Amino acid sequence: MKLAKLVVSVGAMLFAATLAAAPQVGQPAPGFTVKDANGQSHSLQDFAGKNVVLEWTNHDCPFVVKHYSGNMQALQSEMTDQDVVWLSVISSAPGKQGHIDSAKAAELTSSRNAAPTAILFDESGAMGKAYDAKTTPHMYVIDKNGVLQYMGGIDSIPSAKVDDIAKATPYFANAAKAVLAGNTPDPAVTKPYGCSVKY
């Protein structure tokens, strides 16, 4: 009987630990230290006092291709023009779809006219797992105080069709604009869609 209680107790603690580890809107965003495509190290604390966008990406994913038809680049430019730090995060492990090197990162940025502040290489998956990043794309907005204000989908239509972008509710864009205006996003959490992150 005591053993059964111990097993239940340990299970409950592990479950609680899992819940505590998951990122929560309205709470401090998980810290990270990751190198970018140029070998420079970045930590969340480096951007204290700035709004930060995290975009999980995989250039081979059809859902990412959809948004890089122009939508993602427009959002990047709109945000960075307002002094927002935009970090595109690649959590694809070596040998998995979407894993790239520095040269490929530079080529993709140039050929797609992308405008992130930096491209982060999360080869170990530690950053992605800290944020519970599930899909590419998966979007996050962190405010100037380091508080996570939005996590979820880029918009409301989970398809790989470019034509659906204009029809969708732009969840991420609405959330980012709310944070820039000093407001709380509504909704603050939505379901992401896309390809699974290739940890």
Image (tube, rainbow, N blue to C red):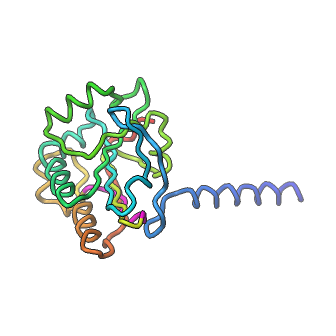
> Is 147 contained in the magenta span?
yes
The x, y position of residue 84, in whole percent, is 26, 58
Segment colored magenta:
146-154
Residue that extends furthest to the right in the rendered view of this protein: 2
Q: Which residue is drawn at 18% across and 54% down?
A: 75
In this rendering, the answer to whether 105 lies above or below 46 is above
The x, y position of residue 174, in whole percent, is 23, 66
The x, y position of residue 72, in whole percent, is 19, 48
Classify the position of the N terminus by image quarter: bottom right
Q: Is residue 12 left or right of residue 110?
A: right
Q: In this view, does 76 lie to the left or right of 98?
A: left
Q: How many marks?
A: 0
Q: Which residue is drawn at 13% across and 43% down?
A: 69
Q: Which residue is drawn at 46% across and 52% down?
A: 131
Q: In this view, does 137 lie to the left or right of 18?
A: left
Q: Relative to the observer, which residue lies in front, 88 or 197?
A: 88
Q: Residue at x 33, y 74 (%)?
A: 184
Classify the position of the C terminus by image quarter: top left
